[in-house]
Image (tube, coloured by chain):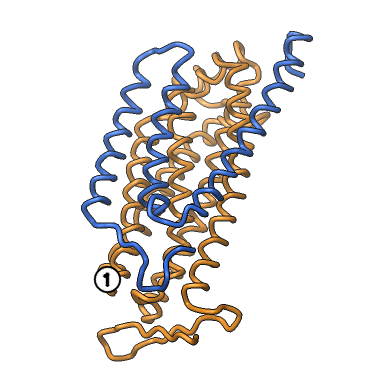
Chain colours: A orange, B blue
Amino acid sequence: MSTANTSASSDGKSHVHHHAHHFDSAEHEYNAAKFGTWTFLVTEILMFGGLFVGYILYHERFPEMFKAGATFLDWKMGALNTIVLLFSSLTMALSIYYMQHDNKKMTLINLYVTLACACIFMVVKYFEYTHKLHLGIGPGNYFQPHGHGEEVQRALGFLKDYPNIGMYFSFYFCMTGLHGSHVLIGMGLIIWLIRRTHRNEFSSKYYTAIECVGLFWHLVDLIWIYLFPLLYLVG
Amino acid sequence: MASGGAHDHHIIPLKIYFRVIAILMFLTVVTVAASRVDFGVMNTVIAMLIASVKAGLVLAFFMHLKYDDKMYTVAFGTSVFFLLVLYFFAWVDFYTRFIHTGIVQ
C-alpha cells in the first residue's frame, strides 16, 4: 500500500510527499499526526488550566482587589485583540479550506493575513506591557508605582487599601505572558507553513502540517476567549 | 479512524465558516455589553458561559470536532474533565483552610 501524493502545482514543478515508512498509508500518517497534536493540546489546556484555577480561587477570595487591579487594563485594547485573534482563526481555517481545493494562492493569502493578525496582536500587547511597566505596575513585589499622573495616584491609593494588589498583576503577566509566547511560537510555525507552501510541498492530498498548526493556532485563540473577560472585564 | 482515504476528509463549506465568525464577533460584543451590567455574584458565571459558547463554536467548526472522528472529542474531553478535578480539589483545600483560620494561608 504505497502512496505517493503529487501536488498539483501550476509551475509544473510538482512536489511528491511520501508517507514515512512506519505508516501503512498516507491516511494512517495523517491521523497519527493529528491525534498527536490533540494530545499535545490536552497538555496545553492543563498547563493554562492550572493558572485559570489559581485565578478563579484568588478572585473569589479577593474580589475587590481584583476589581481594583482590572481598572489598569484598557478593555478596548483587549476587545481589539479579541477581534484580531478571532479573525486570524478564520483565516487559518480558510487556508486549510483552500489547500483542500488545491488553491495555493488563496492558501498563501490567508496564511499571510493570519501572520499579520498575530503581529497586530503582539504590537498591542507590547504597548500594554511597556505602559504598565513604565508606571511601575508590575507583578507581585514589582508593583511599585512611581511617577506622575492619574494612574500612578490611583495605583498608590489601591496599594494602601489592597497591599496584595501585586497578585492581580502576577496573574495578568503570567497568563498573558504565557499566552503571548504561544502567539510568538505560532507565528514561527505559520512562517514555516508559508515557506513550505511556496515550495509546493502541500496539496489537497497532503496538508497535515497546515492542519496541525491550525489546531494549535485555534487553541491559542480559545485561551484568549477566556482570558479577555476574566482579566479585562470581570476583574 | 473512520475516513477511508486522504480524499475523504470532510470539507466544511465556506458559508459555515463565515456564519461562525459572524456569531463569534457578535458574542464578543455581547461579552463587553454584559460586563456593563452588574449581575452581582453572577458576573463571572455569565462571562464564562458566553466564553464557553464561543469556545464551543471554535472547537466544533474551526477545529472540526463536529465533523471529525469522536476520538478527538474524547481526547479534548479528558483535559476538561481533569481540569474540573483539579479545580474541585483545589477549591476544597482552599475553603477548608479558610473556614478554620479566617485567612488563606
Residue shown at 21% from the left, 52% from the top: B15
| Relative height, residue B93 to residue A16 (above, below) | above
Which amino acid does the dot numbered 1 rest on?
His
Which element carries disc 1, helix, strand or loop?
loop
Assess disc 1: are there few (<14), some (14-19) or many (≥20) residues with their C-alpha within 10 Å of its C-alpha: some
User: Which residue appears at 56% of the width and 26% of the height?
Assistant: A146
Coordinates of residue B45 in the picture (x, y in percent):
47, 22
Q: Residue reaching furthest left?
A: B15
Relative height, residue A126 to residue B71 (above, below): above
Q: How many marks?
A: 1
Residue A198 location (% of width, % of height): 35, 78
Q: Residue at x 40, y 13 (%)?
A: B39
Position of residue B92 in the picture relative to residue B34 (left or right):
right
- The quadrant in which the C terminus of chain B is found is top right
The x and y percentages for residue B72 are 51, 53
Q: Nearer the viewer, residue A19 or A99?
A: A19
Instruction: Kindly identify which residue carries mark 1.
Output: A101
Q: Determine whether, in the image, residue B81 is placed left or right of residue B18.
A: right
User: Residue A63: x percent and y percent?
Assistant: 55, 16
What chain does mark 1 sit on?
A
Above or below, A109 relative to A85: below
